[in-house]
Amino acid sequence: MSSSLFVALDVCAVFCALFLLKSLLSLQQVYSLPPGPKGLPIVGNVLDMPSEKEWETFSAWSDKYGDICSVTVLGQTLVIVGGTKVAVDLLDKRSAVFSDRPVCTMGGELVGWKNTLVLLPYGDRLRRFRRLFHSIIGSRTSMKQFHPVEELETRRFLRRVLAKPADLPNHIRKTAGAIILRISHGYDVKENNDPFVQLAEQATEQFSLSTAPGGFMVDLIPALRHVPTWFPFTGWRVKANAWAATLNQMVEQPYNFVKHQMATGVAPISFTSTLLEPKGLSAEEEFDIKWSSASLYSGGADTTVSAVYAFFLAMALNPAVQAKAQREIDAVTGGDRLPTFADRDDMPYVDALVKELLRWHSVTPTGVPHRAMRDDVYEGHFIPKGALVIVNIHRLTHDVRTYTDPMTFNPDRFITAPGRPAEMDPRSVCWGFGRRICPGMQLADASLFISCALSLAVFDVSKRVENGQVVVPVHENTTGTISHPVPFQCTVKPRSEKAVQLIQAE
């Protein structure tokens, strides 16, 4: 090849680079960032960022600036999405641009959650994880193999609540852990103080705190991770080290349990044992299986707890809804047996109740941020490469443009009636979007349905009465990536002597 051709190619490359640079500069000159609160020089909107209940501040910004707004924190652009159309347009229709995750310094890098599905960057490993999930629990059909486990553990839940109704939150957490551990690792939890359930509880709480937007300064200034531990105001380093140790135990201990069970020939069918069955797996394949099963274990443990706890709150606050659901269940079962998954198609109101629960209580109020993989323009707004896109899911599921009287718990909104079409299924937004949609949503949906159906069949939930006064619980969310109802009190009693017999029957 002649030297003149090399020169021509070099000149061409330079012109291409200049053209791309010019295009980028002109793009930024023509289009501006989405509107938002005015920041300060250098630090931007760092003082505007909320430290708790982020969705409330984000909603106030959306009310003022529109369904897409933005702030800049120390040079990092955050795009806040407060409308369903914008969320679908960006994260579903343009998923090729907005499917990456941000580098979360505290939770991802220092604690180690970067290896789990929720924080994996977009790429080959994410696609492998998603294939593993889809092959085992990716559809209602594939989930049927685990229905007996779901029903068994939920019946055990009923017996625990009957024996000690005051310990409702602990019973919910134990049952959620029991179901997810049976499915993920084939592990049968101990009746009291199970170590794997406790690990999941600790680790998921730490995940929620370590990944909350604006929770740690090291997420805004990643260079702080290199500050020595003896430096003042580095207590977060101690937390990071302790939380990393908890996560490591949560990943390794259940995985080693399955390996031991398989070696001795007594491993039941589970997500992990099924994937480990082929011989000659590479180290990379085993790594993916270990961390994908940990993703299932950790992701399902706490989110289900939040939703089921909210169910009991909703029933205490809405006795008419509870009674209507119970009438439907009684009509299907005759009142002489417990409902099963096979009854779901015959219980449209209970199914609608599950949808309303997901809408009314936001388990992940702001989701997990997406990251723009290249520059983009949306409706005249410039979204730079590296921008974090945060969807205010709580706002989407309480939007008066989408839902009638959104603060009211009303399952009928999802049942079509003459002259009244059903409102938008919240599952189209609460599980996430695009290529980052929750791959465990079929499992979560199944767990929530069977918990609601069985509990309604045998229990009446009501407001607590103390000293002759009715205590009305309040529906509020705790701060964190995974949000729970604030603790509340209610009364849970069996509906009848027949209900007690159904609970106690083996």
Image (tube, rainbow, N blue to C red):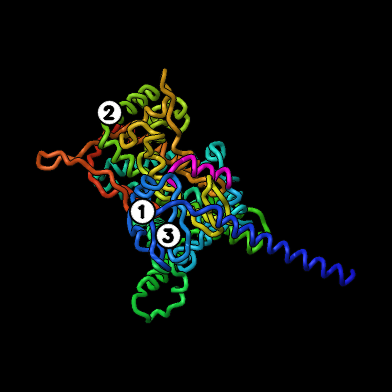
Q: Is residue 286 left or right of residue 11?
A: left
Is 493 colored magenta in this rendering? no
Q: Earlier in the sequence, mark 3 or mark 2?
A: 3
Q: Is residue 455 visible?
A: yes
**Residue 315 occupies which quadrant of the picture?**
top left
Task: Measure the alpha-carbon separation of dots 2 and 1.
Answer: 32 Å
Q: Which mark is residue 504?
A: none
Task: Measure the alpha-carbon separation of dots 3 and 2.
Answer: 38 Å
Q: Position of residue 174 (x, y in %)?
A: 36, 50
Determine which residue is flagged by label 3. 211
Q: Position of residue 214 (x, y in %)?
A: 39, 61
- Residue occupying the point 41% across, 43% down: 153
Give the magenta-colored segment's residue range: 80-94
Determine which residue is flagged by label 1. 54
SS state under label 2 = helix
Q: Earlier in the sequence, mark 2 or mark 1?
A: 1
Residue furthest out toward the left:
467
Q: Is residue 264 visible?
A: no
SS state under label 3 = helix
